[in-house]
Amino acid sequence: MNGAPRVVVADDQALVRTGFRLILDADGIEVVAEATDGAEAVEAVRRTRPDVVLMDIRMPDMDGLEATRRILAGAVDAPRVVMLTTFDLDHYVYAALAAGASGFLLKDVTPEHLVAAVRTVRAGDALLAPAITRRLVERFARRSAERPSLHRDLAALTPRELDVLRLLAQGLSNAELATGLHLSEATVKTHVSHILGKLTLRDRAQAVVVAYETGLVSPGSYDRGDGTEARRA
């Protein structure tokens, strides 16, 4: 993908918007619009067609979750949405991942991490911090009545693809997946691509949600690397 990422920053706090703009501008990333609530964010996306939206969850009038649903609903060329929150276990973040968001950031993120996050999701990858994402999903999977359902039939997946999905759900990188399954990274990438295609998912973030909601991975468990699961202490 050529050119610098184009970003919309949606947050009701002017200080956050200004700070993020300064950080991104300094790295050559263009902030094409700012929004103070969800409705403004939806309109800004329609008007500017950005690559990435940094979306605060808690905003007046229309919150970031509803704005995310509207931006991503039925759009084949929708931007990647990264949720901004002050709480790493905010249940709205889980609902946002189920709605199609590509990940989340805490608002006190370092400048380097912010820039890397924008470039990561713009390239098509999900923004999954393994430890936080695992705790998030384990805490809220099957619990939130507000979240949109992401149930999928896993019967279309091969046994190897199911193995990949189990480990992917734990936040493992492609390199870690390759090591755990004794495969090349190229083969892992192919398996991940097939999983997303067969389950009609946008990215790895949604795959994590599906793995928990379908019961493929149980909250509180982890894979030993040999295909069996153990309970966390």
Image (cartoon, helix red, strand yellow):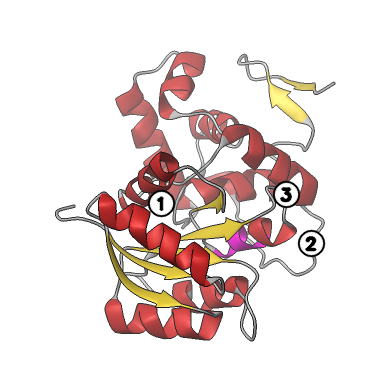
Q: Main secondary structure of the magenta part?
A: helix
From this view, report whether residue 3 is shown above or below residue 79.
Answer: above
Residue at the (30%, 48%) spot, across then down: 123
Task: Identify residue for label 2.
Answer: 144
Going from the N terminus, do you reach mark 3 or mark 1 first?
A: 3
Residue labelled with disc 1: 197
**Rounded to the nearest whole Å, what is the CA distance between mark 2 and mark 3?**
13 Å
What's the amino acid at mark 2? Ser
Residue 28 badge: none
Q: Nearer the viewer, residue 35 or 212?
A: 35
Question: Residue 89: which disc?
Answer: 3
In this image, 65 relative to 188: left or right? right
The amino acid type, in three-letter code, at marker 3 is: Leu
**Which residue lies at the image location 79% right of the left edge and 32% below the top edge?**
220
Which picture quadrant has residue 61? bottom right
Q: Residues within 10 Å of mark 3 (few under 14, many from 20)?
A: some
Residue segment shown in magenta: 95-99
Viewer-side label of 2, 3: 3
Q: Position of residue 207 (x, y in %)?
A: 54, 47
Front-most of 22 and 211?
22
Q: Answer whether labels 3 and 1 touch (C-beta < 8 Å).
A: no
Instruction: Decide whether residue 96 is among the magenta residues.
Output: yes
